[in-house]
């Protein structure tokens, strides 16, 4: 068996074309949505992601607002920028690039954001809505990487109803929220969430119909560990000899039915979902 490819790059391109039309329609009504980014420090990978987000904005016709702050920025100074973007009418939504420097409390910053402008879907209010509103359509931004995973599967015609999904990792950007999306009634998957306290990962891997690997441990999921025919989503990113390396050993493609490459899988989908959140927020405000 050789897995078919969950092509995130091509799917994201398609989504961006759809968003370009929706932005043009908003512009005809005199509305230009804007995405803001706040980056603290000069981590090269974070700077690269933020540049990518601004390129994406230009591509679909969104305005973008960029705030870059030095590594030594205090929590108070960062809070002041957060409040500025909360008040800025040109800013429809924004993100604070994570991780933040260690002297800043990420939770305090996320909670200070206006939940209506939370383009990442990581504000506790929006995560809470994801918990509470299981049966009705979401009218608040969903976390981008989890939404990207769900959209990547559905646009390849894959239905997760009744499937057993194993999520590896409990980080706030992906591991914890992805299960909330997958267990909504419109997806109806059964989810297991594994982390470093999990003692039977081999047993869980051998049973899972779908694996979402979001631990950031290079090639930790091996070919012989998975259930034959499983669907594999490779979210984790590590750098090995300067190269982007996922959590799934590429040899696993020999035993899987579908696999998302990394790069070229969930990463481009995450970026597309961020744009979609901003466009949806602008559409909601306009209606
Ligand atoms: N492609 C994309 O678009 C995106 C990729 N990422 C990548 O996804 C990964 C996860 O991101 P994020 O959630 O923010 O990261 P975190 O560091 O917050 O979370 C990583 C999680 O993985 C768990 N973990 C680590 N090693 C193991 C292991 N051997 N077995 C089981 N669990 C393990 C950790 O467990 P514990 O809590 O016990 O320490 C932790 O919960 C990162 O590599 C990040 O770069 C993130 C967002 C977007
Ligand atoms: N507030 C916040 N929101 C995030 O969404 C967020 C964040 N902080 N911090 C870091 C993680 C990581 N992340 C990625 C985004 C795009 C790619 C991406 O597009 N990758 C390409 C290229 C990879 C490369 O070549 O470097 C790919 O997978 O094909 C990857 C990872 C978003 N994150
Ligand atoms: Mg990727």
Image (cartoon, rainbow, N blue to C red):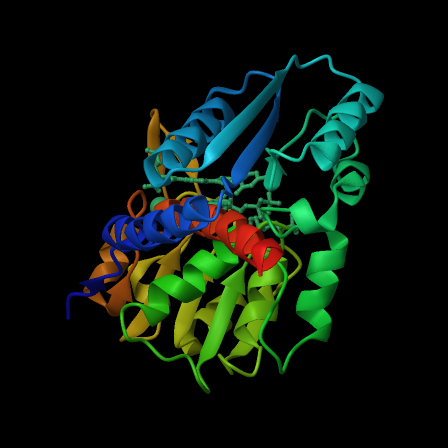
Q: Is residue 103 visible?
A: no
Residue ID at (35%, 62%) = 152
Residue ID at (43%, 78%) = 207
Q: In this rendering, is residue 255 above or below 46?
A: below
Of 193 and 74, the residue lying toward us: 74
Residue reaching furthest to the front:
29
Q: Where residue 7 appears, x then y in whole percent? A: 24, 55
Of 282 and 11, the residue lying toward us: 282
Q: How many marks?
A: 0
Q: Please tell me in which quadrant of the rendered image residue 142 appears.
A: bottom right
Residue ID at (37%, 32%) = 58
Q: Please tell me in which quadrant of the rendered image residue 256 appears.
A: bottom left
Of 173 and 111, the residue lying toward us: 111
Q: Where residue 208 appears, x then y in whole percent? A: 43, 75
Residue reaching furthest to the left:
1
Residue reaching furthest to the bottom:
162
Q: Please tell me in which quadrant of the rendered image residue 3 appears.
A: bottom left
Q: Where residue 266 appears, x then y in whole percent? A: 38, 51
Q: Where residue 219 appears, x then y in whole percent? A: 37, 47
Residue ID at (44%, 69%) = 205
| Quadrant where the C terminus is found in the figure | bottom right
| Quadrant where the N terminus is found in the figure | bottom left
């Amino acid at each position: 068996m050789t897995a078919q490819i969950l092509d995130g790059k091509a799917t994201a391109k398609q989504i961006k074309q759809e968003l370009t039309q929706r932005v043009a329609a908003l512009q005809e009504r005199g509305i230009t949505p804007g995405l803001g980014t706040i980056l603290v420090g000069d981590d090269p990978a974070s700077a690269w992601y933020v540049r990518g987000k601004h390129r994406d904005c230009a591509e679909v016709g969104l305005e973008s607002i960029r705030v870059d702050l030095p590594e030594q920025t205090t929590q108070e100074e960062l809070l002041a920028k957060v409040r500025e973007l909360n008040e800025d009418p040109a800013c429809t939504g924004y993100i604070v690039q994570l991780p933040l420097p260690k002297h800043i409390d990420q939770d305090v910053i996320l909670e200070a954001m206006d939940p209506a402008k939370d383009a990442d879907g990581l504000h506790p209010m929006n995560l809470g809505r994801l918990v509470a509103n299981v049966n009705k359509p979401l009218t608040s931004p969903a976390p981008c990487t989890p939404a990207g995973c769900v959209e990547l599967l559905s646009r390849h015609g894959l239905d997760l109803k009744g499937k057993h999904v194993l999520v590896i990792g409990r980080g706030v950007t992906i591991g914890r929220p992805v299960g909330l999306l997958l267990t909504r009634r419109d997806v109806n998957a059964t989810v297991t969430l594994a982390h470093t306290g999990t003692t039977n990962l081999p047993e869980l891997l051998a049973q899972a119909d779908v694996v979402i690997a979001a631990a950031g441990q290079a090639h930790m999921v091996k070919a012989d560990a998975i259930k034959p025919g499983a669907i594999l989503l490779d979210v984790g990113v590590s750098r090995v000899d300067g190269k982007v390396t996922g959590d799934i050993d590429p040899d696993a493609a020999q035993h899987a039915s579908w696999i998302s490459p990394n790069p070229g899988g969930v990463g481009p989908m995450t970026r597309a979902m961020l744009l979609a959140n901003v466009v949806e927020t602008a559409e909601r405000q306009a209606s």
